[in-house]
Structure formats: structure tokens, C-alpha cells
Amino acid sequence: MSASGFDTVARAFAPDAIGRTVRLRGWVLRSRSSGGILFLLLRDRTGVVQVTGRRDLLGDAVFDAVEHTQVEGALTVEGAVAEDRRAPGGREVRASAATVVHAGEPFPIFAEQTEEFRLDKRHLVIRSQEHVATFRIKAELLRACREFLDREEVLEMTPPVLSGNAAEGGADAFQIDYFGRPGYLSQSAQLYLEALLFPHERVYALTPSFRAEKSRTPRHLTEYLHLEVELAWCDLAGLLGFMERMVESVVHAVAERRPHELEALGRPPAELLAVRAPFPRVTYTAAIDRLAAQGLPVTFGSDLGTAEERALTLEERTPVFVTHFPRELKAFYMLRSPDDPRTVEAADLLAPEGYGEIIGASCRETDLAGLVERIRAVGANLEEYEWYLDLRRHGSVPHAGFGLGIERMLRWMLRREHIRETTPFPRTPARHTP
């Protein structure tokens, strides 16, 4: 029993719990009564347990009060743990005492409701067992990412989310009035991480990023969690190796630590444990040839959208790298390929099973003149990037980095139909409440 005097639900499932008395507190997941016996499922942060209560033991007043507690009402319960094969987990708590903490009003969430209504009531919908499992797994994913990066001696940084210039040109940036001057919500922490790379060599940040894209697809959010890494002395081959080691490590950690939640969401942990590096690699040019052979209307210079990425990965069971994209498709800071001036030293990591891009990566242009040329070519204001150009004037070294969309990765890992199910309060072009 904890210092508070209450046990957790998990205590009722301990090997030595049968016959012992526990004191629990939590919320009603479901309840019914029959013939003077009350059956309810009580949940807390550690799990769900069946509680039974008899009218003749609890007394009429307590029995009636508990019986009229609504779904998501709060209770405390004291009782003995017993075996019951019909109960979830094979255990139940036979109540000898109970207190209604908050009876609650009728809970407005049930299955036969429109998606829009459920999004309006998102603050209540996220109490569902499906969302509980999802966000426990997401927390594990974030922990595993940080653990991997710590082992690799990559230092966590805290770059700003407000900026005076948009990282990738501004077309898809949210502009704000910053005390009479234009400001932007961050699209990427990359430029700041590049500045932090020079004193620390290996850095990362886990921050929200914002994209003002009116993309209404199952894989787009206007606000998402962005894991970004910058590595000094790194070429494209080294970067790909780092990324696939990270993805394998993180996916395996989640599968090992959250098997029950994965099973509950329909993703067998064994499938994630089967994800092994090295991942297949295909050049952009070869990918275009493959897609054209399948009848898709693409040529060299075509962007790879949802349909193209799905076609490349639908039958795959591990992620796939697409490398060496045309220069015009990518951002100004990417390094031109030494053996083909049409392309850049860049790669996208596509999730298997048709889920699409989860990581974008590249070597960074280190030549000052080349960088100035590209900034001008994309129509950006050169003066706004003077501080970034300073990084090429003072000790510039080869370096590379990537950005991983946490929600996109989670969508693949959990086989979610829509990316909004991977974040508690999704932000899309149509919604920024609650």
C-alpha cells in the first residue's frame, strides 16, 4: 500500500494478492446491477479490475449511491481480491466498503456518434481505453528515442519555437505579428541545431513544429512533434546507418515494454520485433522507374506524394530509404551530390505497409557561395539568413541531419487509419479546438 493509504489496480493482480484486502480509487469504466449484486469495472493509471458489491454487505445507502454513479464517476473501494475466470484478468475485488467521490453526470461519449462530435468532445474521448493505450505507447516511443540518442552521445538542446525567419522559405509557415515585426511559428529547429552543432558536435531537439499546409490527408497535421538530429563529421552513408539503428532500437524497445497495449490496439509486438536493419535502399531515379512501370504518371522531377509512397512500400514489412532526390524538390540547405549535380545528398525513410514518409534527411551544404546561390534561387530574403551564413564563415565542417515526425511513426507502428488518433488534441486545417 502506498503512503496515501491506497493501492493501485495493478496490486490486485499481484501473485500474492488472492485473499488480501486492497483499497482502490479510480473511475468507473462500466457498471451494471442484478439481483442485489453490483458489477463494475474500475480503472486507474495501472489498469482495470472488476469490482462486485452486494447490497446486504454494503448497505442500501452505499449500494444505491454506487449504483447511480455514472460512467467516469469517481469511487474508492475496499475489498478482498478473489479469483474469477469470467472477470477481465481473472481477478475481482469483492467490496466490503465503497465511497462515491464524484457521481458524475451522464457521460456523453458512446460509439454511435459522428467523428466531428467526437472531435468536439476530444477532452472526454481521450479517456477511452484505446487512447489510453495509444498515449502510453507514445510516451514509451519518446522515452526510447531519448535513450537511444543518449547512448549515441547526442545532446538534447532547446531551440526556440518563435523565429524571425521560416526555416524552409515561408510558404507553409504560420506568420504572426511579433511586436510589429513579422515572426513565424517554427517549421523546423534545424537551422538552430546547426548553430548548436559546432560547440557540441552531436545535438538533437524534440519540439513542436507547425506547417500551414491545407493538406486534408490521413497523414498531415498542422502541429506535430518533431525529433530533429544534427551530426558533425557525417556523410549520407553514416546518416542512413544512424537512422536505421535508431528506428530498430526504438521500435524494439516499445514492443518489449508495451506488448499488452500493442496487442490491445491490434499490432502484434512480434511484427515490430521483426523490423531489422539494414533497411532497403532505392534511389529516387530507380523509384521513378519502378512507379512508371506500375502505370503511375511520374517522370524525373515528379514529387513523391501519398500514392507514390504507398505504391513503393505497400508490400514491404520494414522501412525503405529513397535517396538522391532532384535538387529542385528539396530545401536550399541540402548538399548537391558530387556525382550528379541534378540531385542532392538526401533521403526519405518511408514506413512499410503504405504509411509513407516518417523521416526526411540530408547532408547540409557547407559551401558559402553554394548556399547563397540556393537561397537566392528559392526567392528567400538573403538578409534574414545572414546569421545562418555565419555558420559557413567560421569553422564549417561536413555535417548531416534529419527530422522524424513522431505522430507519423506512431501511426505506422499502431496501424492507425488517421494521424489524428496519434495525438491527444489534433490540429488540422479545419480544427484548432478544443
Image (cartoon, rainbow, N blue to C red):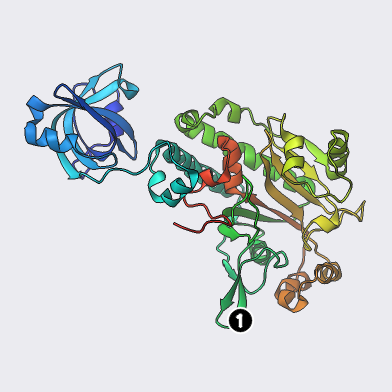
| Image location (x, y in percent) of residue 27 | 27, 40
Vertical position of residue 341 compared to residue 418: above or below:
below
Which amino acid lies under the numbered mark 1 shown in the image of this protein? Arg
| Visible residue check, residue 341 | yes
Query: What residue do we see at 38% from left, 47% from top?
Result: 124
Residue closest to the far top: 85
Residue drawn 31% across and 43% down?
A: 107
Residue 388 falls in image quadrant: bottom right
The C terminus lies in which quarter of the figure?
bottom left
**Could one spot residue 278 in this view of the protein?**
no
Find disc 1 in the rendering and name its residue. 181
| Residue situated in front as seen by the camera: 189 or 115 | 115
Rendering quarter of residue 252: top right
Q: Pick the residue in front: 330 or 258.
A: 330
411 on left or right of 333: left
Across and down, in percent, residue 147 comes to 54, 45
